[in-house]
Amino acid sequence: MAAISRILRLALASAAAGVLIAAIALPAVGGAGVTVMSTTGALRLAPEELHEPPLPEKVTVLDATGKRIAQFYYQYRESVPLSKVSDIMKTAIIAVEDERFYQHGALDIEGTFRALMKNLQSGGVSEGGSSITQQYVKQVLFNQAKTKKEKEAATAPTFNRKLNELRHALAVEDKYTKDEILERYLNISYFGAGAYGIEAAAKRFFNKHASELNLVEAATLAGAVQNPNITDPNLGKEYRDRLLARRNLVLDVMQRAGKITAEEAAEAKKKKLGYKGWDISGGCEQSKYPYFCLYVQHEILSNEAFGKTAKERKEFLTRSGATIKTTLDPQMQQAADQAIRQYVRAGDKPVAAEALIVPGTGEIRAMAASRKFGTNKKKNESNYNLVADVAHGGGAGFQAGSTFKVFTLATALEEGMRFGDGINVGGGYRAASYDTFHNCKGERVGDPSHTVHNASGEGGGGFKTLQTGTWGSVNTFFMALEQKVGLCDVVKTAKRLGIKRADGKKLSEVETFTLGVNEMDPVTVASAYATFGARGEHCEPMAITAIVDRNGKTTEFKPSCKQVMEPEVADAVNNILSGVFTKGTMSGVGGIGRDAAGKTGTTDEYRAAWFAGYTPDLAAAVSLGDPRGSYKHPLRGVTIGGRYYPSVFGASISGPIWKQTMLKALADTDPTSFTNPDMSRFGGCRGSGCPKKPKEDRDGGRDRDDDRGPFGGDDDGPFDDGPFDDGPFGGGFGDRFGDRGR
């Protein structure tokens, strides 16, 4: 009789309220549906299926040890099952939002009638009276809205909207149990302070899991859900005061409902709000490893493996709830960070950047730079990825200088030259004609009007072998060697090893290609050099190892590797580049106590300084240059790390950074030796490649036991990167004659 009485009262009210009764009251009567007669005529209410797309959830990025290093989100949310929500939290939210939740259907008659009376008096919808099921439907529809107009329609105080919600609520009640509805409601609700869902709210407000919430905390969050925009504790004292009042109201409601005692309510009211403001900031600017984070972010946004369209990939990054497992090694990252800070300060105008990559897998272990990532120019922060290429959030990079000579060396060895084979060169090199060099299109790119000079310390020329020419980084020798083996072959070798410009443009195939006129980034250079450490197997740089979706399904990503060079050729390159530490430009810095190989690279007019080196276990490349523009701001007469440098060479700062990084990064790794070169193939010299005057280039090398051949030693001193890098004709000629130093 009581239920019939309520229905009659609602029916009477419908004569005045018309659609209001149909929109708010009627669903409480039926299960499958009900027909109502009012001043608007016949109206059929039947369950209408609700489309429930997955809730936007935060994406978490982990390092190789499983620790979080970054997170991305459209809405900060972590969905949890109802079993991981404390009982007192469930009690509090039901008490204040829908105390008869487990007794009624899609609509609570009593609550709706109470709201109806106030709404009739006000002439509109001034009180909701919605059940938890209806509130869930409203949240789902709001989340589905894409445009501003759609979002306004999803929350508009109209009877048509309420009617639509009721249709969906009927279907939801038929589809789910009450516990399932409550779980979905708690996970979709916004609690304020940027926290979506009960787990995120528990962490944001109280730095704990939803399963750990106590009475005071539960009442606070239950009070926040009604109107989180006016009780957001993150916005100031006025908002926190309103939230405190709401919390105490919830406690009163729980007491009246018999859920807690008067004593418990009074004791809880004495407690402070207790808002912790746990950090939920996302994006790479907040990451401890921002440059690696940027690499991962852009890898996802540009890789079709994470979505066919740009929109799909963005939604994956910010809404999917996935966990991204990466290759970053915290110990190696720390080693790189510390080494850079030892030599370059964050406030210095020049910036140092370093990438560490594993030979044989391509896994990026660390990405470090001397500047912090951010947008504050006054603090000298960088707003782009200093360690990577444009495709991964980077800039134009710096010309790589003589680090490119290794590709000419490798090409010569591939084409049959031996360690002792060499060329007689002078102190300057000039192409005989425009036909001297041809790019891979067959176009003439030689320039007989331009002379390349040796840097200081390279002497006036003479017979240089593959060994001595490399150890001394002799410009004229490598120009002649490139001419001998062919420019296009050198370009092809570089491309096989993954070389591409940092700015995404095509490689500049000019006669000074071997002197490093193309702009590079540390990741690309380290990846190329890692190929030698892996005995000719090139692996694409790799930052992501696995994706675990919100349902726990794991997708693993394997290294993408290809044998691009004979292992024996790589062994020969490794043998020659090992001498850089003992006979060449790094002899003043020294090695790392295990097999290692590398090459310095100082560009023309000291516009940039590089060192790239590797062991069989780890490769690294360090760049140093001024982001304001290397032509206008060369590394001459500069103070870096508190020390004044008249001019900066590859071995001045980049080489020591590399050494200190490798010593610490490999401290827990057992040394792995290079494979000895095949001396029957590469030892000695052959035919025209042998010196015409045996007395030249001999310093006892014939009886060395390190398999470096019979012509090691001469002209190899520590002055590869001398102060006259490429002489007076260096620089100022763009890519063709830009940076030709060592």
Image (spheres, rainbow, N blue to C red):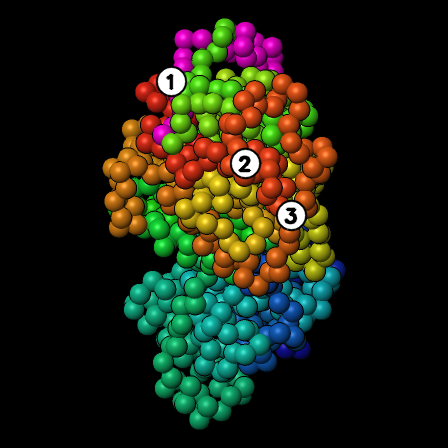
The residue at which mark 3 appears reads as: 674
**Residue bounds of the magenta highlight:** 435-456
x 67%, y 33%: residue = 682
Whether pointer 1 and pointer 3 mark residues with C-beta atoms closer than 8 Å, the reply is no
Instruction: Give the quadrant of the C terminus.
Output: top left
Residue 550: give x, y in percent of width and height: 66, 58
Q: Earlier in the sequence, mark 2 or mark 3?
A: 3
Whether pointer 1 and pointer 2 mark residues with C-beta atoms closer than 8 Å, the reply is no
Residue 718: give x, y in percent of width and height: 41, 39
Q: Main secondary structure of the magenta part?
A: loop
Query: Where 641 sits versus 27, above or below?
Result: above
Residue 420: give x, y in percent of width and height: 60, 30
Residue type at numbered disc 1 = Phe
Residue 329: give x, y in percent of width and height: 55, 57
Residue type at numbered disc 2 = Gly
Q: Which mark is residue 712?
A: 2
Tag 1: Cα neighbours inside 10 Å, few (<14), some, or many (≥20)? few
Mark 1 or 2, closer to the camera? 2
Q: Could you say which is closer to the camera, residue 179 or residue 316?
A: 316
Residue type at numbered disc 3 = Phe
Q: Is residue 64 magenta?
A: no
